[in-house]
Image (spheres, grey):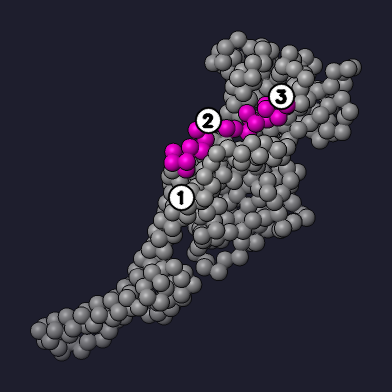
């Protein structure tokens, strides 16, 4: 069975999402633990500012996903588990969710293009760690194919949209003018989108801080003339800024009361793009600072919804791809059952042939072997045909699993 457990911006606040956020190293470690305990066959972990989702495959057809939820909570040292914030899906629902997600249709900023890159990176990390099964591999490649189909057929994302760009537009909407100093903290992919959005809106004074000076200077070289700060210069950079976008991969706050100080008649506007949050919670309580988080981008959804998009046609395209992966998964399930049937019948045949009397002539022995092989083929073919029928070509996975378990038991008893 393949399934999904996760939390996202629909079900959990940013405070809850940051508790469960996983680094690449943590994602590899917990899946390795589950594999060693034979809980899963493999898994792909997606951890972004909007969601933590784990796509897994298990050999158990009646698997209880709460086993993974509780294990994940223990791993993250979360004692008070709220299972209501988790989404658990499998089969068709899971396929549909992943395919909509890959196309940017389930993002907090609908139509954004970053999620596809994040999915591809999650898949790459799991593949390198040898944690991807053939079924998960086929599923994710189908998701990537779906994203391309939606973007080309329905022009979703024809104009690139990103959470960084949406954050800039949100702060821009509350500013009296653009004659101010904008500071970007971080030099990664989200920082790139923030910078581009600021330039497009004609902000003149854009500055950058990054922990390492070399990366900050490389960012400046790529994007033209802008002031850069690094290492111990964060307090200075913050002091001179009016609006601050904080977008780092740090698991602890970067902007704290130690480096951000009150100014007279010049309040701060900060946008914290991080999950876990990059701006200390205590800053949000200050009268001289207004802090926005990734959850505040929900207000940008209406702008996307007002675009001239054919939602029914997009849903039809998604369902088309869901049907294709379902057909493949069902066929794969049947192939596994058929293999077990053939293994069991071959084992029974060999066991029976071993009982033939030694005084038989070679001709008699050959005739019996030929006849028994014919019976085995007839027997297996009949079972395969009946299995196709009663499982509705593999769509009824419960029946398919029951047949598979029956013949596995025959194999076990005759080994």
Marks 2 & 3, CB-CB < 8 Å contact: no
Q: Residue at x 35, y 70 (%)?
A: 338
What residue sits right under mark 3 in the picture?
Answer: 172
- Height in image: 354 above or below 199? below
What residue sits right under mark 2 in the picture?
Answer: 159
Q: Give me the disc on residue 370.
A: none
Q: Quadrant of residue 25?
A: top right
| Lower sequence index among marks 2 and 3 | 2
Marks 1 & 2, CB-CB < 8 Å contact: no
* Residue 230 x, y percent position in the rendering: 68, 17
Marks 1 & 3, CB-CB < 8 Å contact: no
> Left or right: 413 with respect to 79?
left
Queried whether the magenta region covers residue 169, the answer comes back as: yes
- Height in image: 287 above or below 328? above
Choose between 273 and 389: the one closer to the eye. Answer: 389
User: Distance from label 1 to label 2 (Cα)?
Assistant: 20 Å
What residue sits right under mark 1 in the picture?
Answer: 317
**Start-end of magenta stretch:** 150-173
* Residue 256 x, y percent position in the rendering: 80, 28
- Height in image: 148 above or below 382? above
* Residue 399 x, y percent position in the rendering: 46, 75
Give the structural element (helix, strand or loop) at label 1.
Answer: helix
Q: Residue at x 76, y 33 (%)?
A: 292
Label 1 packing within 10 angstroms: few (<14), some (14-19), many (20+): some
Label 3 packing within 10 angstroms: few (<14), some (14-19), many (20+): some
> Left or right: 13 with respect to 221?
right
Give the structural element (helix, strand or loop) at label 2.
Answer: loop
> Left or right: 321 with respect to 107?
left
Queried whether the magenta region covers residue 176, the answer comes back as: no
| Lower sequence index among marks 1 and 3 | 3
User: Distance from label 2 to label 3 (Cα)?
Assistant: 19 Å
Q: Residue at x 37, y 75 (%)?
A: 389
């Amino acid at each position: 069975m393949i399934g999904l457990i996760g939390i996202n911006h629909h079900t959990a606040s940013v405070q809850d999402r940051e508790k469960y956020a996983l680094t690449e190293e943590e994602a590899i470690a917990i899946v390795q633990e589950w594999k060693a305990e034979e809980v899963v066959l493999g898994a792909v972990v997606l951890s972004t500012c909007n969601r933590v989702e784990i796509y897994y495959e298990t050999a158990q057809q009646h698997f209880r996903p709460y086993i993974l939820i509780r294990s994940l909570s223990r791993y993250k040292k979360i004692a008070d588990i709220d299972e209501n914030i988790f989404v658990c899906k499998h089969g068709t629902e899971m396929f549909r969710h992943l395919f909509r997600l890959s196309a940017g249709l389930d993002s907090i900023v609908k139509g954004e293009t970053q999620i596809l890159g994040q999915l591809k990176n999650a898949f790459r990390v799991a593949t390198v760690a040898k944690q991807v099964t053939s079924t998960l591999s086929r599923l994710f490649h189908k998701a990537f194919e779906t994203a391309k189909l939606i973007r080309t057929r329905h022009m979703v994302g024809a104009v690139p949209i990103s959470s960084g760009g949406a954050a800039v537009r949100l702060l821009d909407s509350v500013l009296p003018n653009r004659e101010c100093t904008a500071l970007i903290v971080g030099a990664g992919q989200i920082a790139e989108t923030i910078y581009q959005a600021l330039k497009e809106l004609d902000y003149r004074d854009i500055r950058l801080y990054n922990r390492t000076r070399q990366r900050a200077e490389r960012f400046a070289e790529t994007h033209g003339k802008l002031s850069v700060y690094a290492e111990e210069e964060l307090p200075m950079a913050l002091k001179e800024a009016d609006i601050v976008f904080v977008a780092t991969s740090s698991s602890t706050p970067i902007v704290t009361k130690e480096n951000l100080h009150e100014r007279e008649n010049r309040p701060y506007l900060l946008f914290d793009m991080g999950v876990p949050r990059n701006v200390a919670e205590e800053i949000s309580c200050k009268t001289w600072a207004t802090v926005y988080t990734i959850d505040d981008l929900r207000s940008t959804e209406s702008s996307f919804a007002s675009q001239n998009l054919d939602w029914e046609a997009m849903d039809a395209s998604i369902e088309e791809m869901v049907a294709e992966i379902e057909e493949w998964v069902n066929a794969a399930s049947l192939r596994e059952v058929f293999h077990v049937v053939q293994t069991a019948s071959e084992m029974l045949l060999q066991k029976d042939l071993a009982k033939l009397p030694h005084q038989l002539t070679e001709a008699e022995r050959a005739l019996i072997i030929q006849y028994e092989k014919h019976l085995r083929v007839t027997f297996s073919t009949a079972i395969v045909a009946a299995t196709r029928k009663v499982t509705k070509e593999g769509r009824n996975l419960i029946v398919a699993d029951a047949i598979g378990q029956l013949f596995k038991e025959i194999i076990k008893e005759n080994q």
